[in-house]
Image (cartoon, rainbow, N blue to C red):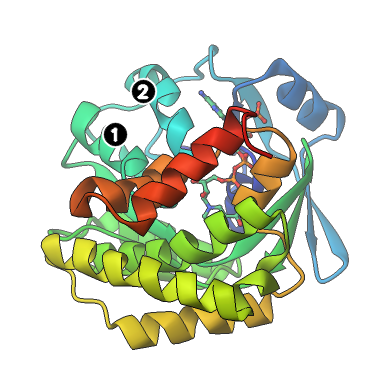
Amino acid sequence: MRIAIIGGGAVGGLIAHYLYRAGIRDIDVYYASMASVEAVRRNKGITIIIDNAEYNVPVTPYSSLSPNGVYDVVFNCVKSHQVKDTIDLLRRITDSETIIVMLQNGFGGQELVYEKISSERTVFGAVYFGAYRRDRHIVELRGPGPLFIGREKGLYPDMLEIAGKLRRGGCDTRVTSKIMFYRWLKLGVNSVINPLTAIARAPNKIVLTPAGLALASEILDEVVLAAEKHGIKLDKNRLLRLVKRIAESTRDNYSSMAQDILAGRRTEIDYINGYVAKIVGDGVNKTITHVIHLIEAGVLS
Ligand SMILES: NC(=O)c1ccc[n+]([C@@H]2O[C@H](COP(=O)([O-])OP(=O)(O)OC[C@H]3O[C@@H](n4cnc5c(N)ncnc54)[C@H](OP(=O)(O)O)[C@@H]3O)[C@@H](O)[C@H]2O)c1
């Protein structure tokens, strides 16, 4: 089975680690920048840190401009707004048999590949583990959690095989036809923790303050409504409890959106709260999306 990973960042690095631990060799990893390709080449792979233990994962790094043939399975692990820039590469490294596993948070990024490349071969994903990219070639597992992959209709033998390999490598991988439910549930968690911590530039425990919980409740009312419009039933109280549990267990961590704002990078707001706003119209998710855009543009600090 020829396997490639597009995006060897936090999520892609860990996927490479789990595959390698399952005995898969010759893993090709594609990067946007030559700086990352060179850093990984110099390091002879990606360094993964789990519970203070270091593992070397000897992948072969490639620039996204230099495709190395066609693969059986491609994991797409770039950020949602970067997916559009992987379409050309995907066209060159996949054929009618390749399955493409999409691992972005939110909605919109995964759908782009479903629409532009293949509705048949795209497998959706929901990542519930937390990872941090310390350096271009160093990734740390910050919070273990399951990985859900699947399609609403039809499961491929290749998908089951790859899930089995990820499990053997230590990743709690579950194949499900209820993948949209798990994606919405994850969006619910992200829709609260990400923007609140990004606006406050504070760690996740900010969500547990009275004002944080009041906002969480308003945000989730709209998330539940948006999910319902897409045929997914979420229980608001259970979702709020999940958000609180995650904010508590990761209380001193900075969410990826907070990290993006602190580093002056673009966030995934349009694919999380912005996506909810597109479905429900005016409301707190739309306001939050505008506020994050103002911060991204540097006009609000
Ligand atoms: N990190 C987490 O804990 C976590 C958890 C759940 C879900 N997610 C989701 O997973 C997705 C990926 O997040 P992440 O944290 O892994 O991101 P990340 O650490 O920023 O990694 C993104 C990687 O994608 C590469 N890339 C960008 N554009 C590319 C292109 N056109 N061709 C090839 N490679 C390209 C980047 O290359 P360069 O190195 O050259 O810049 C980088 O290696 C996001 O949607 C995020 O919301 C993340």
Quarter of the figure with residue 43: top right
| Residue 221: image tag | none
Task: Determine whether, in the image, residue 82 is placed left or right of residue 228.
Answer: right
Crowding near pointer 2: few (<14 within 10 Å), some, many (20+)?
some
- The answer to whether residue 104 of the structure is visible from this angle is no
Q: Which sits in the foreground, 97 or 275? A: 275
Residue at left offset 57%, top offset 74%: 211
Q: Position of residue 247 (x, y in %)?
A: 61, 76
From mark 1 to mark 2, how far is it between C-alphas? 7 Å
| Residue 87: image tag | 2
Please tell me whether residue 297 is drawn above or below residue 12 in the rendered image.
Answer: above
Q: Give, as a three-letter code, the residue at label 2.
A: Ile
Tag 1 and tag 2, C-beta contact below 8 Å = yes
Q: Give, as a three-letter code, the residue at label 1.
A: Val
Task: Determine whether, in the image, residue 46 is placed left or right of residue 71.
Answer: right
Task: Determine whether, in the image, residue 88 is placed left or right of residue 32.
Answer: left
Q: Position of residue 175 (x, y in %)?
A: 33, 68
Residue at left offset 26%, top offset 70%: 224
Please tell me whether residue 161 is drawn above or below residue 4 in the rendered image.
Answer: below
Q: Find disc 1 in the rendering and name its residue.
A: 113
Q: Quadrant of the N terminus?
A: top left
Q: Position of residue 297 (x, y in %)?
A: 58, 27
- The answer to whether residue 137 of the structure is visible from this angle is yes
Crowding near pointer 1: few (<14 within 10 Å), some, many (20+)?
many
